[in-house]
Image: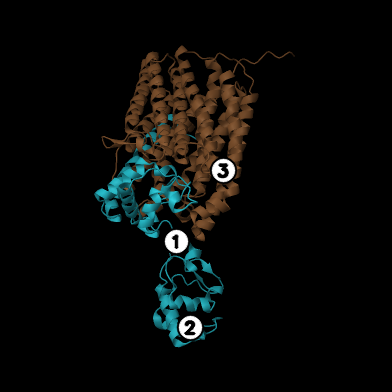
Amino acid sequence: MDMSNKTARNLFIFGSLIFFAIFLAMTFDTLGKLDQRAPNITQAIDDGKMVWHKYDCVGCHSIFGNGTYFAPDMTKIAARKPHSYLKQFIMDPKGVNSQAVMPKLGITSDEADKLVAFLDWISKVDTNNWPPKPILATAAGVGGKPLTAGQLVYQSQGCSSCHTVNGIGGMSGPDLTKVGSTRDHDWIFGHFKDPQKYVKNSAMPPVTVSDEEIGQLTAYMLTLKEVTK
Amino acid sequence: MTMQYKSQKMAQNFYTFAVVLFLVQVLVGVIGALQFIWPDFFFLKFHIIKTLHVNALVVWLLTGLMGATYYVVPEESETELWSYPLAQFQFWATVITITMVVLGYIWMGFDPQANKTVFGTLILNEGREYIEAPRWADILIVVSVLTFLFNMFMTMWKTKKWTGIQGVLMVGLLFLALMYLPGMFYSKSMVKDQFWWWWVVHLWVEGAWEIIAGALLAFMLMKTIGAKREVLEKWMYIEVGLVMFTGILGTGHHYYWIGTPKYWLWVGGLFSSLEPVPLLLMVWDAFRTTREARNVSNRAGLFLTVAHAIFNFVGAGLWGLIHTLPQVNQWTHGTQITAAHGHLAFYGAYVLLVIAMIYVTLPSIRGIKDYDPSRAYAAFWWMTISMVFITMVLTGAGMVQVYMERLMGLDYEAVKANYNLWFWIFRAIFGAGFLVGVSIFVWDYFTLKEKAPSSA
């Protein structure tokens, strides 16, 4: 390469400074936006953060996926488990669950309340949809919500042998993950009754259930607007 | 190669401290590996072991790099250290501070309540990964590093040689010192806490430390095979330049999911994907220079130098690349895949770097003209094969975790205790293999001497 050492050196120094300046500008922009992406921090939440630090929780756990992978990630724990359970577990893990790995650290009742308040705050931060909801568990309806009537029709008719929703299902027919944002009610309802009328040469058989059930299935399709995360 | 300036032997103090801590780091690492199988094994619980494991790592690499600098700067400046007593003071201050911090962690293992808040900061352990050291220790560490930098700068000032190698080395060390500061204040918001925390962690290992590695790579290639300084320094500038161009904005790959705006997905994904480029260039540089070599003065030293370049690229580069895009990282983030990357990256980029520097400089410090390299090679192969398998095993565990936990929705504990058990068993076995390698290295370090004249 026909570059002098001086040119290479200047490229290193000034190039680095330019990239660092861009990074600083982005940092400034980001810091201005962070408070809108999370709830306000009360005294209890701040105290709870100190409890998190005091017991070196990050020595086994992680938050936002950062930390140690010896024990579960805590990002959404307060949204998934009852707070009363969390408090009792934190104070005496093996007392709640004899299989628990976590040692009893002597966390007081007051500290546990604050820690749960802190974890609750963490669970409400806008993390760009991380961690993603597990697609199989969501499809199986064990994600914490009962199946809707439309989802039950979808299951009983075996739609998933040809169609995919959120990554689960067959690929013979179109992916329905976002069908709700591309088709309206009348199109979907009519299409179920007579697919060939709407899509020429469609190989899909008509759905032969009652109009009420087709309505429920249509309502379910209309909820499919973006990838479940 | 012989040592030209008496004060260069200061390097050996730091090397010794580093080597001892390396042994401690790997010993507790094996204990931690066993605790994945038996959580109640050993009287210190896992969080204390893990804190000791990563802190010993960071500290021994830092002291190793300081030792290397104490050797390089007088050599490059062609003069004695500005102040040998100041260097001695800095050494002992560092040893005492680190020892107190370690004792604090262990104390906390016996009595978690001992980690009290004094003047708003925790007295034994700040509870932030990698930078657990409490604030009082942070301040002492900064003072130690500033003393060190001042001594180095004054040494260079004596002769004003300003060579490229020591210039880049100093830029790396100065950047390192500056990037410790964002870890030294409290943020109420965990989002901001992690935002600044990554300044320290990422801009150290994928910024400052890689700059230091670039400078030391050039130095070692020059010393082991007498490669031409001009060519080495030009490529060094290009390599460290590319490290900064990709690495600074590459910090964005840590800002995908911590509560920061979505634009980091684009910025982090793009720039961090380019981070392996300078590391590949370093590999090419090492091979090109070595191929031209006619006169190798220290074969084991050269071997380790090239091995460092290769595993820096594989561990820090490739194993980072596989999960750096947000589309992939969304599923892999926070799994054992990260741990796999962490292990091979630190080993290739920095463990081998410090070990290579020790084998390149220690013979001349001890006045050894030619040493028997068989133990150096044995240590290298034990460590490297073990670490490659640890990385494979952790990557496998991470893949199982991604499928079962992230895609299927099984409970974390179920995957860890049942489906990944064999991975933990193999990791512990290869961990023991790594310990064998480290023990051979430590033994060789303390006993390295002139090769017995052959009878032939």
Q: How many marks?
A: 3
- CA distance separating discs 3 and 2: 51 Å
Q: Relative to A71, is A114 on the left or the right?
A: left
Find residue A133 and name its label. Answer: 1
Find residue B391 and name its label. Answer: 3
* Element under disc 2: helix
Kindly identify which chain the residue marked by label 3 belongs to: B
Kindly identify which chain the residue marked by label 2 belongs to: A
Question: Which chain's colour is cyan?
Answer: A
The kind of residue tagged 3 is: Thr
In front of the other: A121 or B266: A121
Q: Which tag is nearer the camera, tag 3 or tag 2? A: 3
In front of the other: B3 or B277: B3
Work out whether residue B329 can be spotted: yes
Question: Which chain's colour is brown?
Answer: B
Q: Earlier in the sequence, mark 1 or mark 2?
A: 1
The kind of residue tagged 1 is: Lys
Say yes or no: labels 3 and 1 on the same chain.
Answer: no
